[in-house]
Image: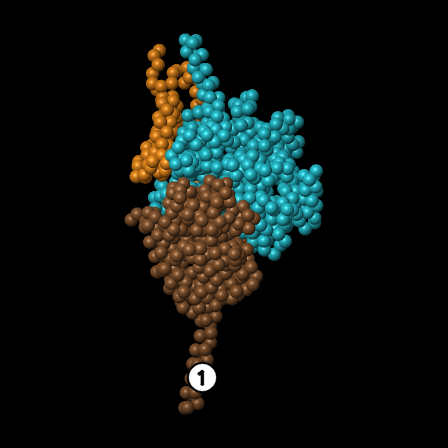
Chain colours: A cyan, B brown, C orange
Amino acid sequence: MEFLDNLALGFNVALSPTTLLYCMIGVTVGMFIGVLPGIGPIATVGMLLPITFHMRPTEAIIMLAGIYYGAMYGGSITAILLKLPGTAASAVTVVEGYPMAQQGRAGPALVMTTIASFFGACVAIVIVAAFAPPLAQFALRFQSPEYFSLMMVGLIAAAVLAHGSLLKGLAMAVLGLVIGCIGQDRNTGLPRFTFDIGELYEGVQFVVVVVAMFGLAEIIHNLALGGKHEILARRVPLRDLIPSREDLRISFWPMVRGSALGAVIGILPGAGPAISSFASYALEKQLARDPSRFGKGAMEGLVAPEAANNADSQAAFIPTLTLGVPGDATTAIILAAMLIHGITPGPKITTDAPQLFWGLIASFWIGNLVLLVLNLPFIGLWVRMLSIPYRILFPCVLLFSCIGVLSLNNDAFDVYLAAAFGVAGYVFLKLGCEATPLLLGLILGPMVEENFRRSLQLSRGDPTIFLTRPISLAFILVGVFLIVLVVAPGLRRRKQAQSST
Amino acid sequence: MQKRLLNGGLLALAIGIVAGIGLASAYPTKPITLIVPFPPGGSTDIVGRVVADGLAKELGQPVVVENRGGAGGTVGTAVAAKATPDGHTLSIGTTSTHAVGPATLPKVAFDPVKNFAPITLVAETPYVLVVNNKVPAKTVAELIALVKAQPGKFNYGSAGAGSTTHLAGAMFAHAAGLKMEHIAYNGNGPATTALLSGEVQVLMGSMPAVLNQIKSGAIRVLAVGTVRRSPELPDVPTMQQAGVKGFEASLWLGVVAPAGTPDAIVKQLHAAILKAVKNPDVAKRLRAAGAEPVTSSPKEMGDQIKTNLSKYIELAKVIGIAKKK
Amino acid sequence: MRLRARIHDPKDVIAGLLFVAIGLATIVGASDYPLGAIRNIGPGYFPILLGVCLALLGAAVAYQGIGRDEAAAAGAVHESDEGLGLRPLIMITLAVVAFGFLVRPLGLAAATVALVVISSLAGRDFSAVRVAVLSVALVTLSWLIFIKLLGLSMTLWPR
């Protein structure tokens, strides 16, 4: 009953006119920011922070939060239409969304993305509202060995992500791991592979690689194909913008699974929404009856990650609010905003500032609803963007990508880095190697290494630490199971081939 | 004849005065850029933006914050060092950029003393000695005794090898003669989480990162690293008061200009920033970010940079993370 | 007909060799980094391990591209070669680099024009009118969005 009381309080706060207004502003601004490649919620929240100085705390936090998940949605739009993810978390959306757009199904893709995001938000809000404090405590049980085992499972899932040759996919994943080694080693301070370039000390930024290997490479690829075409040559009738009943039917369970997975991963401090979307994608591919559809526009592969990353970004507020520990970089800024406004996050926040807490939770739901309602009319507009002649479209996309990359650190070096990765991305594209496993390796690599070394440091050199801790052991078993799943069909096939000769 | 001389003299005087006023009021002639060598949203960035806001009001020209993150702040600082010294490009200098970074990183593209004209300090945040609640020590003395009884068993965390939290923690261990294992994390956030979860038991944390955890009782604070008690934690002794002689670990932040900036402009900026920081509104926002407003003269700040630099170079050698030339 | 080792899929061979090269480069590059002991693994351990894995995988990929039996080769998909796309590759890369080079000293306007002009050379047809109009439009649009609205620290004109 208390749960319902809390929600009632929350909605009361969130639905008040000024709060609602700021929520809508935040969500809309966030969405447009998300569309712009490279410029993510971090920069925006940082830049808009001073404006919030003169606002009431609850309104300020709700607006900043709105920017956060609004951007997540906006990133999906360009991911689907242009193979250019607007945010890191939208990288996975490209894999199924872009082929769907090329098949003329951009409309259903966009609509289902919106619905999936909303679904993810709904599930997350229930989980957060009902279980916030105990979940936060659970998050604290996740220490270095558990993070390592979890990330290892993620890496094994990378083998699943490759559509073509398994070997090439694995090689790309390992390459991603290698690129992730660039930078200053946190444990010893030794710079690795930095060639004395100061800008490489923090490593290669994920956003740069994503924008370059997907977006830039795709532009080069399209131009090589002729460049006179539009991405979508024919006019799309309104009817085709709406997903079919079949689309909705096959989406349901993937959305449920994605939301659950996203919510769980979101609670863990340090694991960002990109990981949820990759994990959810891998899960769906494993569970699908016909995995060969993946990579060619499989709806399950689109909606599950979308639900996951939205649920994740909302669940990430649990450690932020109840522990005062940011879930990822964007929540770190929101945390700073809270401190500036005099709000102290911590276990007592539900009693000290119930209006803020429950108001924020309720605003997630409302914000996502606003996104849903706001976007449905726009979808026709977005799809129509595809019929702009390519020779006019691509310089725009190119320019916005460059500006976005530049805005990360105001350093032209990042732009040069993007150019380099653009070349690499195109080369790999021509060679039939996919970028997605590389991206996964890039995200997970540093965390796998860091947590592995740290776990051994903590155990003073005892490798059984991964097996003696129950949660870690559980993940390792899952990982072993996954390996068996992947390898076993291959073994069986070889046995059959041998027995038939 | 005399009249002409007098007129000429008066005219010359008038021109002189007008030129003098013209020169002095020539600054600032366009918007000022304040380089914050850290990513947006961090505590340095917040301090930078608060100061920029206040300074803009004093100078009548917009002060635009430019984030240039990377390598503990040294990338952005290197850029600031090379800027035109006309007072229109300033940067935030901190213990990290002007002392710890140059002391521990193998290659830093600037000299913290020679390439900068310090203007004033604006804020100071102490490092605080915090422990996980399960650690049975309520004072610094108890902690020292506890660790000495079980050498090598306790872990202290940091935001990364060579970071200010690492050096502050190492400083404490060195000063108290303790043997603790250093566990590096990827930033202040994860280090604080690790303390919360008990993965590390001790942390010399930066105040903004741990303040609300202390206030909510999630972790226990034993001492502050500044020489004066912190107004935010008035009941907490300083490290020196707790018995650790000569201990001082704090993160200071200030505004610096590239070397060669004319003295008149430095003076003008100094006066303006002082006024801005003393404004109660600005002071309130700084405190909310965990930073205590302070001010100083340019010379005082320059001296502070020099002493800090040598202190951290010494410390880095002792711990063994000195630059390998 | 005997099975002959022919290169049936040059893409795999090239990709494989590329991986081997990068893997070896990684090993060489990391050879200076300390390996450490098990209770404190050094920064060299992981990169060298990865370099070895990459080189091995690369060799396997390259092997996959040669010596396939004829039956598989017959079924191998040979995509219609759209050509190497060297011109778009060079032009787009050049355009991005030019943008990065020009944007801070000369401002957004100059950098944008350079980007639009160079990248338009990547396409099949180049129309000076179209490029000019596009340049002006994009400079205006990006000024509006990025400088005015978002307040990114870029200047439109030279500093």
Q: Residue at x 55, y 29 (%)?
A: A301
> On the rendered structure, is A62 left or right of A174?
right
Q: Quadrant of residue A254?
A: top right
B297 and A170: which is toward the camera: B297
Task: Report helix, strand or loop for mark 1.
Answer: helix
Q: Chain of mark 1?
A: B
The percent coordinates of residue A153 (x first, y second) are 48, 29
Can residue A460 be seen? Answer: yes
The percent coordinates of residue A473 (x first, y second) are 48, 28
Quadrant of the drawing holding the N terminus of chain B? bottom left
Judging by the rendered image, the residue that carries numbered circle 1 is B10
A431 over B84 or under it: above or below? above
A470 and A54: which is toward the camera: A470
Q: Residue at x 34, y 57 (%)?
A: B310
Can residue C110 be seen? Answer: no
- How many numbered marks, from 0 up? 1
The percent coordinates of residue B205 (x first, y second) are 46, 49
> On the rendered structure, is B149 left or right of A482?
left
Q: Quadrant of residue C31?
A: top left
Q: Amino acid at mark 1?
A: Leu
> On the rendered structure, is B281 left or right of A452?
right
B126 and B259: which is toward the camera: B126
A361 over B301 or under it: above or below? above
Q: Residue at x 43, y 87 (%)?
A: B6
Q: Quadrant of residue A490?
A: top left
Q: Residue at x 33, y 37 (%)?
A: C36
Residue extending farthest to the left is: B325
A374 over A249 or under it: above or below? below
At label 1, counting other C-alpha atoms closer than 10 Å, the crowd grade (few under 14, some 14-19, many 20 or more) is few
The percent coordinates of residue A475 (x first, y second) are 49, 29
